[in-house]
Amino acid sequence: MRTTIPEPELYDILFLDIETVSQYEHLADAPAPYRALWERKATYLATADETAASLYDRSAIYAEFGRVVCISLGYFHRKPEIGETLRVSVFAGNEQNVLAEFCSALEAFRSLHERVYLCAHNGKEFDFPYIARRLLVQNMVLPAELRVAGRRPWETRFLDTLELWKFGDYKHYVSLDLLAYTFGISELLEGMDGSKVHSVFYEEGDLPKIAIYCQHDTATCAQLYRKMRGKKAIAHENIVYGTPLIFESET
């Protein structure tokens, strides 16, 4: 018999966003076995004039070929003197350090909440499984929230603003940017989007820029979730962006 799960409490939700890059700047930089495996993968992705090398920046979205360079976390908190706030933190750089900070932050959040939910835009297909896979690759322990093997869909505590927007339509993908515009939420960082993360990381070496972008995505997802639940977005001045924690990158 299916158990009825209560509506998530807003303060029990940890909102998140991740940024990923390819494991190497160029395919030619990769070792031969890696190159061969990507070339095989690329045969299923390529259209007329595309090659494995030209498609390589897309490898970042696959946990087998990419890695996490940034994770941002956000949660709502009420302070008596100013009311409701959204607090957003971010870790960037070395993948092991970033994943370790994520696990520590999740553990700390769990210690204060009886029931913890994770929320991201397209999180069920990207952020949540990507983090879990990279934790395993790095020989790290999966947090309880990500140990979902064998669980029924309604037994996981995953929330996804893309899924909420689909209303059962399996074909309908909508970007966070578009939904932010649709709902009048303007927390996104101008002049930056996910397609630029690879070049900002490898060519510019600007981890703080990626971190700030990631924070704004997390804030946007949190504000979007509020709107989808019939609540007003909180004021910009009540969003508290923490100083990015930057670890020395592998590059």
Image: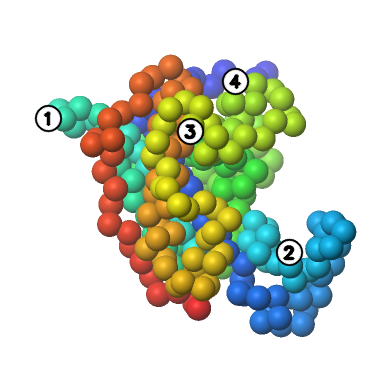
Q: Are marks 2 and 3 in contact (CB under 8 Å)?
A: no
10 Å neighbourhood of mark 1: few (<14), some, or many (≥20)? Answer: few
Q: Which mark is residue 180?
A: 3
Disc 4 or 1, which lies upstream in sequence?
4
CA gap between label 2 and label 1 equals 51 Å
* Residue 235 shows up from this direction: yes
- Is 79 left, or right, of 62 in this rendering? left
Q: Are marks 4 and 3 in contact (CB under 8 Å)?
A: no
Indicate which label's residue lies in the foreground, 2 or 1: 2
Q: Are marks 4 and 1 in contact (CB under 8 Å)?
A: no
Residue 212 lies in quadrant: bottom left
CA gap between label 4 and label 2 equals 44 Å
Indicate which label's residue lies in the foreground, 3 or 1: 3
Name the residue that disc number 1 marks.
81
Instruction: Pick the residue in front: 37 or 232.
Output: 232
SS for tag 1? loop
Q: Is residue 225 above or below residue 140?
A: above
Going by the numbered disc 4, the residue's amino acid type is: Thr
- Residue at 60% over, 20% down: 3
Q: Are marks 2 and 1 in contact (CB under 8 Å)?
A: no
Name the residue that disc number 2 marks.
55
Disc 3 or 1, which lies upstream in sequence?
1
10 Å neighbourhood of mark 4: few (<14), some, or many (≥20)? Answer: few
